[in-house]
Image (spheres, coloured by chain):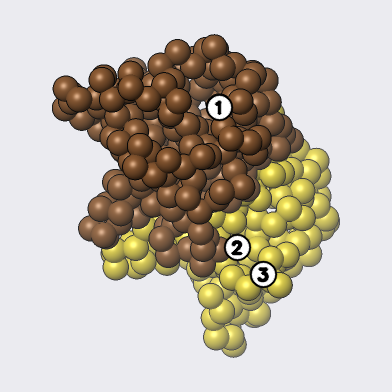
Chain colours: A brown, B yellow
Amino acid sequence: MRLRNKQWAKPLILAHPEMILVRPEKMQGHWQSRFDQARPLYLEVGSGKGQFIVEMAKTHPDRNFIALELQEAAVAMILKKQVALKLPNLQLVLGDGADLTDYFSEGEIDGLFLNFSDPWPKTRHEKRRLTYRDFLRQYQAIMKPDALLQFKTDNQGLFEYSLVSMNHFGMTFDLVSLNLHHDKRVTDNVPTEYEEKFSADGGRIYELVAHFKH
Amino acid sequence: MRLRNKQWAKPLILAHPEMILVRPEKMQGHWQSRFDQARPLYLEVGSGKGQFIVEMAKTHPDRNFIALELQEAAVAMILKKQVALKLPNLQLVLGDGADLTDYFSEGEIDGLFLNFSDPWPKTRHEKRRLTYRDFLRQYQAIMKPDALLQFKTDNQGLFEYSLVSMNHFGMTFDLVSLNLHHDKRVTDNVPTEYEEKFSADGGRIYELVAHFKH
């Protein structure tokens, strides 16, 4: 969702170049040097206010995480949390999911998260959906072949579309859950802000985990 | 679901060899000769009481249909309807979905329906699910490469399983619907007996349409 602009966002971002990048291209192939040590590297495309990625970084100290977010106001809210937490395994990026192959080199990413992406329900906006084939092609380029893509949404239409799109792309499904919060197979779900509210209202959450290797 | 045995079933079946086969192996490769004329050939595996296949045969006079059912009591109920209707494009078979490659020759089938198959929820019964890979291999053998398999269920676990199983088998998805009766893309759904009752109670129906060709 679109957030109101925040006057404090830009100054905060400029004050913390050690935590957030606004020109991520320059790190292509060298992302591990942004962390205190090299660890398997996980990327979230569209982090929103960051509840998911911050919680993941806390609970998985053996992994490095990158939160990518297009909105300055949103990424600044993640940064505010990180300024307080100083998690050594979390880096933020103000950037565009359409430019991933400029930001990362081939096979640099060990896992990728898409959480509650904009559904873009109109057919003429199909190309903007983060599970459209052009995006999948970019994920494939930057991910290791057996790395997992984890996709969550509450939007039925987007989930139906994504199952077909990922199947057509030749991806291999690892898990399909049509009601994630009542799925006995999934015991380690980390909810986003939106997911907590939506699910508390009784809505269903869908999840697809898949990889590119055949 | 399992029906009570009916004493009239066997005599009725034996009295109508022109409508129902109990030794379908002998028709392998020659199914069109069972109909008044050759038409594209559609098979339902597990027809139950036959509401779906009878309605399909009525509304699609340009296609031939075969209703395959393992239970004598169930197939006899379809036969009772067919004795009254005498649809020229419907044939019944008392037989087993596990023996399809004995009944049909390669590419003989132009479309296949699986409706509300037994979910067999226990992991140790996976091999009995009609979307298990051994069944898919048989469907692939008897279907034309671009023929569509249409699978409907109300069982969430079976649908999740089937999405993964068909994806792993290399099938190409044509349609995924997570709420068939409220799906604007689907205007020609023919419900089964069970589907009508279940949906009237507010339950969701899932549908997957897919084919084997890449």
Q: In the rendered structure, find residue B208 and report the number of the disc placed on it.
A: none
Contact check, label 3 and label 2, Cβ < 8 Å: no
Q: Quadrant of residue A168?
A: top right
Q: Give the residue pinned by disc 3.
A: B123
Q: Output the chain of dot 2.
A: B
Disc 2 and disc 1: Cα gap in Å?
Answer: 59 Å
Q: Amino acid at mark 1?
A: Arg
Q: Give the residue pinned by disc 2.
A: B46
Q: Output the chain of dot 1.
A: A
Mark 3 or mark 2: whose residue is earlier in sequence = 2
Horizontally, is A209 left or right of A212 in the view? left
- Residue plotted at (52% across, 12% down): A25
Horizontally, is A16 left or right of A73 in the view? right
Q: Output the chain of dot 3.
A: B
Label 1: state its secondary structure.
helix
Contact check, label 2 and label 1, Cβ < 8 Å: no
Q: Amino acid at mark 2?
A: Gly
* Quarter the C terminus of chain B occupies: top right
Q: Give the residue pinned by disc 1.
A: A34
Judge the density around disc 1: few (<14), some (14-19), many (≥20) Cα neighbours within 10 Å: some
Contact check, label 1 and label 3, Cβ < 8 Å: no
- Residue plotted at (20% across, 30% down): A3
Horizontally, is B186 left or right of B53 in the view? left
> Which residue is at the front of the view, B122 or B120?
B122
- Residue plotted at (37% across, 25% down): A16
Q: Position of residue A166 (x, y in %)?
A: 56, 33
Label 3: state its secondary structure.
helix
